[in-house]
Amino acid sequence: VSANGVTNGGTIAIDSATTTSVDGAVFAAASTGAGGSIDVTATEVEIGSQAVIGVDGTRSGGRIRIGGEFRGTDVAGLREADLTTVSAGAVISADASLGDAGSVIVWANQDTIFRGDVSASAFGATGSGGLVEISGLERLALGGSIAANAVSGDAGTVLFDPGTINIGYFNSV
């Protein structure tokens, strides 16, 4: 699925009442401007090992919301997941090549299992790192890699905000 643009990336919303699975390419990137936005929502969200999800931009990275909004904030029209899984091998990015990076939210009202790779980084002579939140309101099992860095500007923010967190090797939450 692609909503790439020259000036700005577009908007993609993938939603279902029960389960949404993504195991391919989903892009809303921009070649000269700001990355777009991608929402992936359902009661259960599965991001597979072959998934590549990106809202990269030149001027700024865009916004990715998988399973919900920042800190589980209720947003009209945005379904919140009870379970969100991001498999090893999945790549999620909201990078910027010249300006500020964007944001990536991976959320579940109950459990989040994260084993993928996520980046909200700024690679240019200017620009700050972005925001990455990976949280499950009740439990978070965290593996994979996370980057919110900047080559020249301020580093970004990484937030984990679960009731219980397991970092490293795990079989379940």
Image (tube, rainbow, N blue to C red):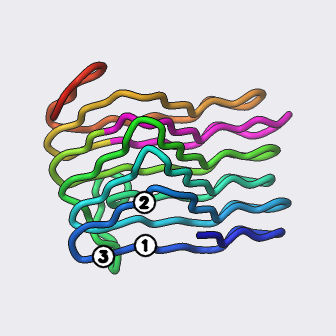
Residue located at (50% from left, 51% from top):
51
Give the CA separation, mark 2 to mark 3: 12 Å
Q: Is residue 98 left or right of residue 101?
A: right
Q: Is residue 112 above or below residue 147?
A: below
| Residue 120: x %, y % from top left | 59, 41
User: 10 Å neighbourhood of mark 1: few (<14), some, or many (≥20)?
Assistant: some
Task: Pinpoint residue 35: horizontal percent, then vertical percent.
Answer: 68, 60
Q: Position of residue 96 (x, y in %)?
A: 73, 46
What stretch of residues is rendered in magenta?
114-134
Pointer 1 residue: 14
- Residue under circle 2? 22
Q: CA distance from mark 3 to mark 1?
A: 7 Å
Calculate the distance from the C-alpha at mark 2 to the C-alpha at mark 1.
9 Å
Tags 3 and 1 in contact by the CB under 8 Å rule? yes
Residue type, mark 2 in image = Val
Q: Dot 3: what SS? A: loop
Label 2 CA crowd tier, 10 Å (few <14, some 14–19, many 20+)? some
The residue where tag 3 is placed is 16
Q: Where does the image place residue 139, in percent across and percent down from the top left?
A: 17, 38
- Which circle's residue, 2 or 1, is located before the other in the chain? 1
- What's the amino acid at mark 3? Ser
Q: Residue at x 41, y 65 (%)?
A: 40
Q: Residue at x 53, y 43 (%)?
A: 91
Given residues 21 and 100, the one toward you in this image is 21
Q: Is residue 124 magenta?
A: yes
Which is more toward the observer, 132 or 23? 23
In this view, the residue in front, 88 or 129, is: 88
Q: Are marks 2 and 1 in contact (CB under 8 Å)?
A: yes
- The amino acid marked with disc number 1 is Ile
Q: Earlier in the sequence, mark 2 or mark 3?
A: 3
